[in-house]
Amino acid sequence: MNGPELTVLTWLLAAAPVALLVVTILWRKWSAPRAGAAAWVLAMAIALPAFGASSQQGSIASAKGLSLALFVLTIVWTSVYMFNLVDRLRGISVIGRTMARLTDDRLAQALLVGWGFSSFIQGVTGFGVPVAVAAPLLIMLGFNPVKAAAIALVGHGWAVTFGSMGSSYYTIQLVTGYPGNVIGPHMAALFAPIVVASGIAVAALHGGWADVRRSLPTVVVAGAVMAALQFTMAWLGAPQIASSVPALAGMVVIALLARTPLFPRHGDLAAPAGDAEASPMPFWLAILPYALLITLSVLSQISPIKDAVKNLQFGLDYPGFTTSEGFSVAAAANYAPIKLLNHPAPLIIISLAVSALVLARMGRWKRAAAWEAAKLTYAQCLSTTLGVSLMVMMAVVMADSGMTVLLARGIANASGPLFPLVSPFIGLLGSFMSGSNTNSNVMFGLLQVETARALDIGGVTIASIQSIGASVGSTMAPTKVLVGAAVVGLAGRENEIFRKVTVAVLALVLLTGIEALVLVMIFSGWTR
Amino acid sequence: MLSTATKKRMRHLALAGIGASFVLLYVGAVSLDSAAVTAAGLITAAITALDAWLAF
């Protein structure tokens, strides 16, 4: 026996915590910590009596959830702090203005800032920051506020999974158990059409089909470079920079092609951006922490360095168990380990320390900025920390009591051969209701893979598609749209941005589903 | 209804509560295999969940 028998009642019980999350976040408009708290309590209340888990097993699952949350949250805390510190030192505005000076064509600027720069920021921080930085920058360049917010939102959707130093990617890898060298390149390859399509969506949001036609050669070339680099980074084992490096390269390609006949000039030109001499610091100094991080991420993948520090890691051991309903969970040694040079948090800390020394030597270090950034990071991350912790606890309790497997079996029976088409929309649902690709992967990652196994279709593809759907879908999450509306001064008029974003996001997610369906139907061997 | 200041204080407590829950749940259910410590961990986690539900 492998958990309770699949009946309508057991399936409804297994679905109850997820349904509670959906209903409370979407309809009752609860925050993530509030909904997560209720869902964890409900998951425990169902897992213990109905799924045969003991209180000790429920406790082990909850503690495992917190181990997993710690892995993800250390990335969140350090990357948000890094961004806030660079921002407080006025480095982000220097980076943004330098990007804007690369071209005076408005469409090229939309692609450069809305597709490239917002994705770079997503690569190194995330959590709504891309829209908070890129949208005001577009307004500064003379864009309409609704367009600015919509472009910044849709433009970085492809960069979310490998963004935030790879936190969502690491989560899907951890919850599904697929090794990085299997799922990383596979997912990056599946992202390729979405990278290009995101650029097309930005052009369409800017000026409809006329702008899509005008920018198509540039978008295709830049998108191909970005997709190829994303694949390369994932294949090299550096997923934490598989959004930031391609985004930077994309910006360079867009800036270069915008000066060639491949990008026909248009009368709609912007005023030149601010004077370089008014800049609070040189560009190289502003970008230094991120450049160091990228360098360290690449260096850490070199075998001798990797081998030298492989034992420097922190992870807890968890025992295996079998519930009274017969559902078995394997023991996990060194669960969700934080490795010194293979986890973004230590790399960020090292990059920040070196940058601080350089800044101090150049007389540009401000202790007050470091303290302000810390206070801001704490305030920004408090809700995320509670939300992620409680939702991950709920997800692991569901997984370790057999609820997720049962839920998956039910979905597999209902959707049958069309499941790959439905799969990215499940990812979208998760990120829409929680505002986070990571949370969506925690909630639905294992469920999707179990469903794929039940249908005997490619689990790696479905796990990848879950995260891609969640990545793109997170950009239409109310939490992000609210940030977008607030920063462009349209608070209370979120629906105008939401309408623009929804069409583009749904089209991208549908494309993801079609891609998965075609792959599973035609290349079923490759998708496993 | 809770005041904004009370909610703010409760948010900090929720963060401390989730940290304490982690320690108690792990030590109780894994390290010591102690029913009493595990129960303390579950109670702390439940109180933290209630705190988060009220404060956020």
Image: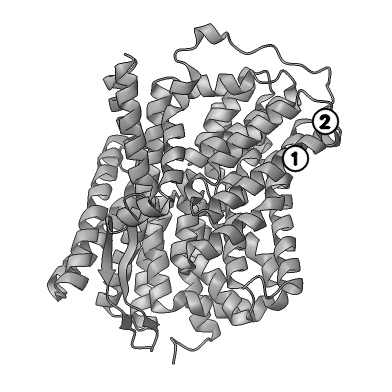
* Depth order, front residue of A95/A384: A95
* Depth order, front residue of A294/A327: A294
**What residue lies at 83% left-to-right and 21% top-to-bottom?**
A265
Q: Position of residue A260 (x, y in %)?
A: 80, 25
Given contact means CB atoms under 8 Å apart, are the residues at marks 2 and 1 in contact? yes
Q: Which mark is residue A262?
A: 2
* Depth order, front residue of A422/A486: A422
Q: Splitting the image into 4 quarters, where does residue A452 fall?
A: bottom right
Q: Residue A141, relative to residue A303: is it above or below?
A: above
**What residue lies at 44% left-to-right and 15% top-to-bottom?**
A281
Mark 2 crowdedness (10 Å alpha carbons): few <14, some 14-19, many ≥20: some
Q: Name the side, left or right, on which A72 lies relative to A439.
A: left
User: Tag 1 or tag 2, which sits nearer the N-term?
Assistant: 1
What residue is pinned by disc 1? A221
Pointer 1 chain: A
Give the amino acid at mark 1: Val
Q: Position of residue A58 (x, y in %)?
A: 30, 73
Q: Splitting the image into 4 quarters, where does residue A67 fall?
A: bottom left
Where, quadrant-wise, is the N terminus of chain A in this rendering?
A: bottom left
Give the amino acid at mark 2: Leu
Q: Residue A210, relative to residue A504: is it above or below?
A: above
